[in-house]
Amino acid sequence: MKTAQRIILALVFETLPFVGCSAPVRSSLDTKQAVGRGKEFVFAGGTTLRVKVDEMTDRKTCTVSIRGDGIYAEISNASAIVIGVGYMVVGRALLRVGDSAPFSLPFQDLHYRFVLPKNRSLEVTKGLLSGKSIPVRFDDSINGGEVNLEIQPGDFRGAYNQATDVCGWSSPPANPVPKNRKNPSR
C-alpha cells in the first residue's frame, strides 16, 4: 500500500464522525455503562457494536461497524448505512449484493464516503446478514485505475442481533410483496 493511501486511510478511520440512530433508553447495566463514554461489543472478523447514551437527551445511539483493508461500513439500523474507502474516488463507484445487478454508490460530501439510500441499505443489510462478502468497485483518483474491495461481514449477524436486544432495532423486513395493481389494499 502506498504512503498516500496509508495517510488517507488513517484520516478516514481516525476522523470519521460517529454515525448512529437514536432509540429510547432502556434501563440495564449495559445502558448505564454506555452513558457518556460509550460501550463497545467486539465480534469476530473485525465487527463491533458501539452503544452510547447522549448525556443531554438520554437517547441511545447504536452503530455496528465493519472494518476491513481499505474499506469500512457503519450501520446504524437496517436502513441507514455509510460506506467509506481509504481512497479518493473519482467517477463511478459500484456495489453489488449477491446475484443482483450492481448499483452506483452516491457520494456524500467527500470523495471517500457514501451514504446508501434506504432501499439499498436494506438490501446491503440483508446481504451482510447472509454472511457473504459485498464487493465494491471504484476508480482511484490518486493512483489511477480501478480498485476492487470487499466488505467482509465478520460476525455481522451476532452484532446485529445484539443491537436488536440492546438498542431495540427491528429485524430487517422480508423482501417486500409487490402490491396487486387491481387490488391496492394488498
Image (cartoon, grey):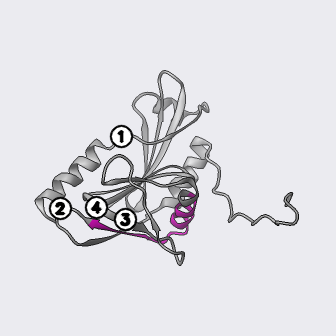
Q: Which residue is mark 1?
A: 17
Q: Can you tell which quarter of the image residue 88 is in?
A: bottom left
Q: Which of label 1 and label 3 is nearer to you?
A: 3
Q: Which residue is mark 4?
A: 90
Res 93 label: 3
Q: Residue at x 64, y 54 (%)?
A: 171
How far is mark 4 from mark 3, CA to CA?
A: 8 Å
Q: Residue at x 47, y 23 (%)?
A: 55
How far is mark 2 from mark 1, CA to CA?
A: 23 Å
Q: Which residues are magenta?
A: 122-139
Position of residue 20 measured from the top left corner of the image (x, y, whole percent): 48, 41
Q: Name the secondary structure under disc 3.
A: strand
Q: Name the secondary structure under disc 1.
A: loop
Q: Looking at the image, which is closer to me, 99 or 59? A: 99
Q: Earlier in the sequence, mark 4 or mark 1?
A: 1
Position of residue 99 measured from the top left corner of the image (x, y, whole percent): 53, 78
Q: Earlier in the sequence, mark 1 or mark 3?
A: 1
In the rendered structure, which amino acid carries the disc numbered 3?
Ala
| Mark 2 residue crowding within 10 angstroms, few (<14) / some (14–19) / many (20+) | few
Q: Looking at the image, which is closer to me, 151 or 119? A: 119
CB within 8 Å, label 4 to label 3: no
In the rendered structure, which amino acid carries the disc numbered 2?
Ile
How far is mark 2 from mark 4, CA to CA?
A: 9 Å
How far is mark 1 from mark 3, CA to CA?
A: 21 Å
Q: Is residue 115 left or right of residue 16?
A: right
Q: Which residue is mark 2?
A: 142
In the rendered structure, which amino acid carries the disc numbered 4?
Val
